[in-house]
Image (spheres, grey):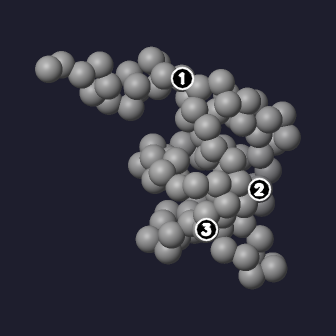
């Protein structure tokens, strides 16, 4: 059987974008949490809203796949903390430089 979904680029072309939103409030001691997620039209709306509000978007296919497997309101598993920490440091650095 030949699959049309042999890579992420082709899958995105066929199915549209995917998106997940993480909320993290270190000041209140909260753990990172999934607050929105979607595919296709819903994902595009999430992406559009982020762009309209100058919210940084990070493209990490493997992380996104893991986040989409979680339910809304779930805390991010500790196994993903290192990847999320790297993203947050990158965002912080970008904000300082701009």
Q: N-terminal of the two: label 2 or label 1?
A: 1
Residue 97 location, quadrant: bottom right
The answer to whether residue 55 is seen in the rendering is yes
Q: Is residue 22 left or right of residue 61?
A: right
**Few, some or many residues within 10 Å of mark 3 (<14, 14–19, 20+):** some
- Asked if 81 appears above or below 43 in the picture, the reply is below
Nearest-to-viewer mark from 2 and 1: 1
- Asked if 39 appears above or below 68 in the picture, the reply is above
**Mark 1 and mark 3: span between their CA atoms?**
26 Å
Residue pointed to by mark 2: 95
Taking the view exactly as shown, the residue that stands out farthest to the bottom is: 29
Residue pointed to by mark 3: 75
Residue at x 72%, y 36% (from the top left corner): 46
**Mark 2 and mark 3: span between their CA atoms?**
25 Å
What SS does tag 2 mark? Answer: helix
Q: Could you tell me residue 79's position as x and y percent? A: 44, 71
Residue at x 81%, y 42% (from the top left corner): 54
Q: How many labels, in total?
A: 3
Q: Could you tell me residue 1's position as x and y percent? A: 14, 20
Label at residue 16: 1
Q: Are marks 2 and 3 in contact (CB under 8 Å)?
A: no
């Amino acid at each position: 059987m030949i699959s049309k979904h042999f890579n992420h680029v082709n899958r995105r072309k066929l199915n549209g974008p995917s998106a997940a939103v993480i909320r993290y409030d270190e000041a209140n001691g909260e753990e990172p949490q999934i607050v929105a997620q979607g595919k296709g039209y819903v994902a595009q709306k999430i992406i559009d809203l982020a762009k309209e509000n100058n919210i940084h978007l990070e493209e990490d296919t493997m992380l996104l796949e893991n986040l989409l497997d979680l339910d809304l309101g779930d805390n991010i598993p500790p196994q993903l903390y290192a990847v999320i920490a790297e993203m947050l440091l990158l965002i912080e650095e970008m904000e300082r430089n701009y």
